[in-house]
Image: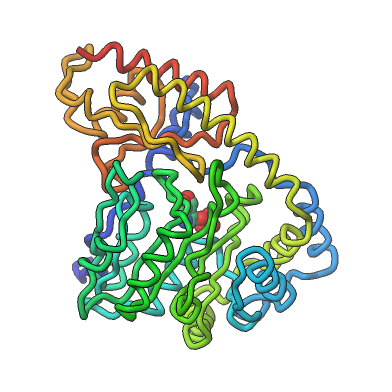
Amino acid sequence: MTRPLSERTQNIAASLTVAIDTLAKQMIAEGKDVVSLGAGEPDFATPKPICEAACKAIHEGKTRYTPPVGILEVRKAVSEKLARENGLHYKPEQIIMTSGAKHAVFNSLAALVNPGDEVIVPAPYWVTYPELVKWLGGKPVFVQGKRENDFKITAEQLKAACNERTKAILLNNPCNPTGSVYSKQELAALARVIVAEDIYCISDEVYEYFVYDTEFTSAAAFEGMEERTIVINGFSKSHCMTGWRIGYNAAPAPIAKIIGKIQGQATHHPSNIAQYAALGALSMGMESVNAMRAAFKKRRDYMLERASKILKTPANAPQGAFYLFAPVSDFYGTKTPSGKTIGGSVELCQYLLESEGLAIVPGAAFGDDSCVRFSYAASDEMLQKACDRFKRGLKNLV
Ligand SMILES: Cc1ncc(COP(=O)(O)O)c(C=O)c1O
């Protein structure tokens, strides 16, 4: 064939986190001894009440098409959750059930972005954001969160990045990959700029339940924000439902309508069964979420303790999510036992995978080449092995 494929797809990158996880899984399947802390996937099973809700839905014949925006029962439950836990007022008709939070990010950008529009992406960022902005013809504008400010951007930085082409900011709080969490005061200051500059906010809150020494506040909870904020959330992380592909958008009414149209033409709706499973998740109480948070906090403390003895520059203590973003640039310029030079995070991760069987993600994937990302959503035994391998791998660099 000589006819060209879609130009818009030419400059989007494949997800490096997915690539590393796939490679690690392939190596494991080939019988290699690999410890993989690459994927952001809780290691716990989906709680039983959720599985039971899904089985019940199947047996009751909830196996047909639903409205594109999802079934009313689960949208009502999401609306009530947002009111109860986050003090928000999105009505059921403003909720759209999606095939995971990633899909909800896509929906949001598809509803907002015109070619040439700028979307502010605080860096370090989740790998998917800039690629989706680019795919839709927009321009990601990176604003670097400084390590001294726990990788968070300030209101002043945000203001300086805004201009007449700015359409929205893509906030991720708590953040993947840094684990940083914006305080209420910091968010209030950002919200004032967002309102004053009259831009939209896409607020990805998938890690809201995993905060450790602080409290979570939704970006939509500030004056003037709900009418311009699309909240994104899902069940992959909070309820160990990565493979179920279920999440949601909560959006201002005109945007919710557009997202409903997009979804009606693109995917129709997420799986009917997964929607009932999500309803089960929203009805089951917080016991399993609380237990996971406690487990992650212990693991976070373990990873920090080990990292402090291995690294030359101390890692920031993640306040949320389940990632450690470890500074490793002190090791750049060194050589591996086979004579290869470690030039940056990609080479370091390649070396650790090949020589130690340790899969972690280069910071370059998240817009910060000075770090590597460990996911500590893994068993204590895996974390211990990973840290041992990390230590040995770095020690062997000369
Ligand atoms: C910040 C962030 N948003 C969204 C997602 C995607 O979640 P889902 O599995 O619901 O699509 C992830 C997954 O890694 C994430 O880290």
Q: Does residue 36 appear left or right of residue 241 in this picture?
A: left
Q: Pinpoint residue 328: horizontal percent, then vertical percent.
A: 28, 28
Q: Position of residue 29 (x, y in %)?
A: 50, 29
Residue that appears at 25% across and 72% down: 118
Answer above or below: position of 320 versus 271: above
Q: Quadrant of the C terminus?
A: top left
Q: Is residue 204 above or below residue 199?
A: above
Whether residue 105 is visible to the viewer of this picture, yes or no, is yes
Considering every residue shown, the one lying at the far front of the view is 185
Q: Residue sitting at 46 percent across and 54 percent down? A: 183
Q: Residue at x 32, y 78 (%)?
A: 196
Q: Position of residue 354 (x, y in %)?
A: 33, 23
Q: Quadrant of residue 370?
A: top left
Q: Is residue 37 above or below residue 87?
A: above
Whether residue 242 is visible here, answered yes or no, is no
What residue is rendered at 26% in x and 73% in y? 137
Q: Height in image: 200 above or below 121?
A: below
